[in-house]
Image (cartoon, helix red, strand yellow):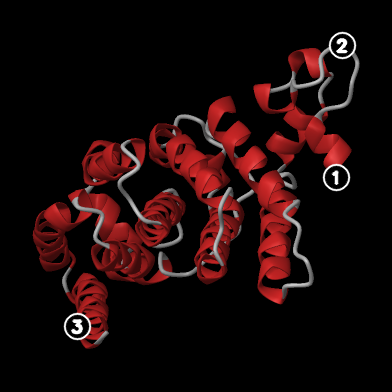
Amino acid sequence: NEVTQSRRQIGHIIAELSSSLSLVSVEDGKEWMKTVLNHIRPGCGNMDPMTFQLLGDIADRSPLTLWSVGSAEVFSSLFSGSIENIQRSTCSLDQLEASMGALLQVGIAHEKAQRIMSSTQSKDQMEQALMAQFDEKSTTVDASSPSAIIGKHFLPTMLEALTVFGNSLSSNQVDVMSSCMSHLSTCSIQCPSMLAGDDASLTCLLRTCMKFAQINSQGDEDITFLKLSALDVLATITSVPQIKRSILKPIGTSPRCVMQGGGSERSPLLKFL
């Protein structure tokens, strides 16, 4: 535990340095960010939770600098090892939660960076870096954005693995699963493109959340909280106008996620809601 705490504290320091350098000197911030991304690559490949938490912290505090030196290809390479481990069923729920949290935070970081870069209010780079740290709700889905591209590539596999873990959820795993739902909820508010870039991503998200929302809590407060967290993700993502319209279309033209009943039946999602 002491080693873990020390590594976590060092991670906070690195993330804070990344943020501070970005504000003091844009170019120095970029060089530092390149160095950090190179150094965390092996840890990401091994699905080290501390490394993923560091990446998530950096994405949260320095979104503009992160995406000024990175791209969908760069970040995809950081998570490719995760997918291989998930497909081989050689990862733990803690590793899955950390990798998913970092992935979603990277997507949110792009949404923040894009918002600032498209704004004409200020051209001062340090001011832009500071403004990019603020959270803001997004109500649009851009299927061609880097966030959506990364989401399409990684999220279905991660969500399917999450569902598998949910089939035999132990008491000490409930809090970790709730953290996963929290990551998804935050992303559904700030970057819905990451979760709904295509039918497959949206399908997996809705099915996963519906599964956990319907778990029998048996009076357990932690499981009840998990159920509510899953419902929160469902409510938030389906409130996005583009997604809401696609769900409410006639079943023959709806996304695959709601084409379960056939004929004129209502979709399982609408029945559930």
**Label 2: how many Cα within 10 Å (few below 14, some 14–19, many 20+):** few
Task: Tell me if residue 99 can be seen.
Answer: yes
Residue 263 - label = 2
Q: Looking at the picture, which amino acid does disc 3 mark?
A: Val
Give the structural element (helix, strand or loop) at label 3. Answer: helix
Badge 1: residue crowd in 10 Å (few <14, some 14–19, many ≥20): few
Say which residue appears at 72% left-offset and 54% top-offset. Answer: 215
Based on the displayed image, in which of its 4 quarters is residue 228 positioned?
bottom right
Q: Which residue is mark 1?
A: 273
Q: Which mark is residue 3?
A: 3
Query: Residue type at mark 1?
Result: Leu
Q: Which element type, helix, strand or loop, lies under badge 1?
A: loop
Q: Judge left or right: residue 208 versus residue 47.
A: right
Identify the mark at residue 157; answer none if there is no mark. Answer: none
Rendering coords of residue 220 (x, y %):
72, 73
Q: Can you tell which of label 2 and label 3 is closer to the viewer?
A: 3
**Other-residue count near label 3 (Cα within 10 Å), few / some / many at <14 / 14–19 / ≥20:** few
| Residue 149 lies in quadrant | top left
140 lies above or below 172: above
